[in-house]
Amino acid sequence: MQRFRKNSVVTLLTALAFLAAGCGSNGSGSSASPSGSPSAAPASSAPAASPSAQASAAAKSSHEGLTVTLGIQPGPGPYSLARKKGWFEEEYAKVGVKVEWAEFQSGPPMTEAIAANRLDFAGLGNLPVVTAQAADIGFTEISQIIDGKTNVAIIVPKGSKITKIEELKGKKVAVAKGSNAFNFLYLGLDKAGLKPTDLEIIQLQPNEAQPAFETGGVDAWATWDPYITTNVISGKGTVLTDGQTLGVLSPSFLIARTKLAQEHPDLVTAFLKVYEQARVWEGTHLEEANKLYAEQFQVNAAVIQELRKRAQPINLPISKEVIEQQQKTADFQFDQKTIRKKIDVSKVVDNTFIEQAIKDAAKEPKS
C-alpha cells in the first residue's frame, strides 16, 4: 500500500498488496466530515418532483458536504478497479459526498485509523478484525471478499532445505504482527506441535520482509498475496504450506466505521454496491481487467492471472460457518494472549448492507 516506483521491486510488491488489515467502542468523531452547509432552496412554482427524485434530493441534503475516507491496500481486484474507474466518486457525488483515499501496508494500521476516526471503510484479513474488536474499536463487518483458502502461506527461499513446517524449529521467520499471516503462522505451528518460542519470529511489514527474504535475513516468510505469487513466479521462493494444505482459512472482509454506519447507513450500502459492480464487471471483462492491472502496476499479465487463481474475489454476506471459523480464531488468539479478552465475533457482523447492495448492483451493472 505504498506509492509505486517503476524500478523498485519492493515498492512494486507493496503496491500490489491486496488484502490481507486504537480504542473507543464507536468513536466520537467522524472521518466523514462536513466541508460546508447546503444553502436553502428558494420557493418554486415548478411541478412537484417524483418520489424517487424527492428521495434523492433528501439524501443529498442529509449528506451534503461530507467526505468519506476509503482505506486500501492497492493491487488488482474490484476495489482497485473501482478506484481506477472513479466509480466510488461517481456514486457518492449523487448525494453530495466527496471521497478521499488512504493507503496502508496491512490491516492493523487500518483499524487504528478507524479508532482515530480517520478512516471509514477498509478491506482486511481475519486477525486484524479480531484484535480490533478485542480493543473495542468501533467497526462493523459488512461483507466477505476472499474465502481464504490459498491467499495466505509460508514461503521459503528457492533452494531452501526446509520442506515441512516442523523444520522451522530454530529458524528465523518473518511475519507482520497482527496480520492474517500472523494468525496463520501461529495456527500452523500449533498444528505442527511447535511453540512460537521454538523459532525466532521477526515482526516485519511487507516492505521490510521482502528484502530480508531476498538476502537471506530470514529463513521463511508468513505472508499473503501478492507476495506469495510474485516471489514464486519470479523464482525467488516456493510455498512451504498454505491454507488449503494446512486446513487453515484466512478470509478477508470489508468493514465500515460503526458510527458512520449508524448515522449514514445508505453510504455503507452504496460503498458495497460499487464494490459489487466492480467485481461483476471484472468477471465479465477479465481480459480487459487483466490488461488494465498489468499496465497500472507494471507487471506481467501472468502475475495478475495467478493472483486471481489464489484469491478469487467474492462479495457475500458473512455466513454462519465463517463466523464460527472467526470465533475459533478469536478463541485461539486469546489462548495465545494475542488479545486480552474473550469476544463474541458475531457481534460485529451486519449483513443487511450487503444483502441490499447486491440487489442494487444487479439493477445498475457497469458496462
Image (cartoon, rainbow, N blue to C red):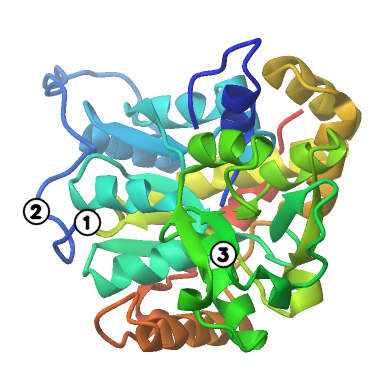
Snapshot quadrant of residue 129: bottom left
Residue 186 image position (x, y, % from top left): 53, 75
Residue 170 at x, y percent in the picture: 58, 69
Q: Is residue 17 above or below residue 167?
A: above
State the residue in front, 59 or 176. Answer: 176
Sequence-wise, the earlier of marks 2 and 1 is 2
Q: Amino acid at mark 3?
A: Glu
Question: Where is residue 180 shown, x and y percent of the image?
Answer: 53, 62
Which residue is labeled 3 in the image?
A: 355
Callout 2 secondary element: loop
Q: Are marks 2 and 1 in contact (CB under 8 Å)?
A: yes
Q: Residue furthest top?
A: 6
Does residue 350 appear to the left or right of 161 in the view shown? left
Other residues around mark 2 within 10 Å, as few (<14) / some (14–19) / many (≥20): few
Give the mark nearest the N terminus, 2 or 3.
Answer: 2
Q: Between marks 3 and 1, how big is the CA–CA gap?
A: 20 Å
Mark 1 neighbour class, 10 Å CA radius: few under 14, some 14 to 19, many 20 or more: many
Badge 3: residue crowd in 10 Å (few <14, some 14–19, many ≥20): some
